[in-house]
Image (cartoon, rainbow, N blue to C red):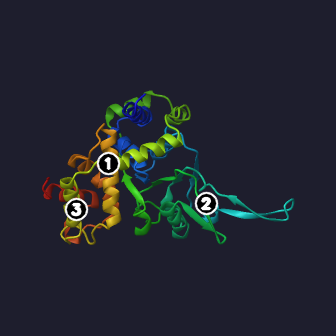
Amino acid sequence: MNIQEKLTALVDQLNTVIVGKLEQTQDCVACLLAGGHLLIEDVPGVGKTTLAHALARTFGLAFSRVQFTADLMPSDLLGVSVFERGQDKFVFHPGPLFAQVLLADEINRASPKTQSALLEAMEEKQVTAEGLTRPLPTPFFVIATQNPHDQLGTYALPESQLDRFLMRISLGYPDRAAERQLLNGNDRRDLVVALPALLTADELLALQQQVLAVHAAAPLLDYLQDLVAATRSGQWFVQGLSPRAGIAVLRVAKARALLSGRDYVAPDDIRAILPQTIAHRLVPTGEAGRGATEQVRAMLDAVPLP
């Protein structure tokens, strides 16, 4: 099985569990191929946690799941040192963060203090606990789900943490045909348990290197810089994108190109992934009267293609 067949099989397998959401599953695969963390935001019951489980199993990675609650403490994630009588010393017991994939379920139900414990892990792929810095497994991904901010018991994620997520997607309600398939089909959780791993960790790391090798021509980079400059103009957003965000857009566009079987990035790759990659990093201007995602789409239409 060549690379393109393997990538197609990855997306197809996810679509057996999350039906009627082809674009969203492609975005998820592109996000992990680009080496980034994924935030899935939507109302309860539309398949956020199921999708996160399916991703971890399909990519063949060791994963742990943490249900974020208001009383969750940073040590519940990082781990603690416990005195071992046999060794006559304190021994560090790693927490669930020490996995290749951390499924952070309903991440915005935890307190800001616990949310901030993830910052170093997400950016540096390491954690500092009890004065020692410990590396996390490779590869390391956070796949987080969150409920809308207007629901009871939720805390808004700080901007610094939102910026650590490479992409934010929303599943939305299924269409009528997909929902009928859900009503007639097997329980989604049973399907997830039966999913085979289609990649190994080493194969995933090799694919991530291939993503970096995808070519981006000078006119394409000009177009990307035009879009970044538009976010900083003050016309669309309160503050513009950082250089890190521009690099993130290019990485996801390269992953999208590889998924499409190309070794070069096209403008359509950027247009396809831009709202999911930057909307969570931006605040629309007050007179816009639109949400961040709608504002990004309006900006896309206003910036000329190369």
**Residue 32 x/y as whole percent:** 43, 48
| Left or right of 35 on screen, residue 226 | left
Q: CA distance from mark 2 to mark 1?
A: 32 Å
Q: Amino acid at mark 3?
A: Gln
Left or right, residue 15 beside residue 216: right
Tell whether 158 sits left or right of 239. Answer: right
Whether label 2 touches label 1, CB < 8 Å = no
Number of numbered discs overlaid on the protein picture: 3
Residue on which disc 3 sits:
225
Using the image, tell me which numbered label, if any, was put on residue 254.
Answer: 1
Mark 2 or mark 3: which is in front? 3
- Residue drawn at (32%, 66%) of the image: 243
Q: Secondary structure at mark 3?
A: helix
Q: Pointers 3 and 1 in contact (CB under 8 A)? A: no
Find disc 2 in the rendering and name its residue.
77
Q: What whole-number distance in Å separates the C-alpha atoms at marks 2 and 3?
A: 38 Å
**Mark 2 and mark 3 residues within 8 Å of each other at the beta carbon:** no
Crowd around label 3: few <14 · some 14–19 · many ≥20 (10 Å): some
Q: What SS does tag 1 mark?
A: helix
Residue type, mark 2 in image: Leu
Name the amino acid type tagged 1. Lys
Q: Residue at x 19, y 62 (%)?
A: 226
* Mark before the other along the chain sequence, 2 or 1: 2
Q: How far, Cα to Cα, is label 3 from label 1? A: 16 Å
Write the residue at 13% across / 58% down: 302
- 214 in relation to 287, above or below: above
Mark 2 or 1: in front is 1
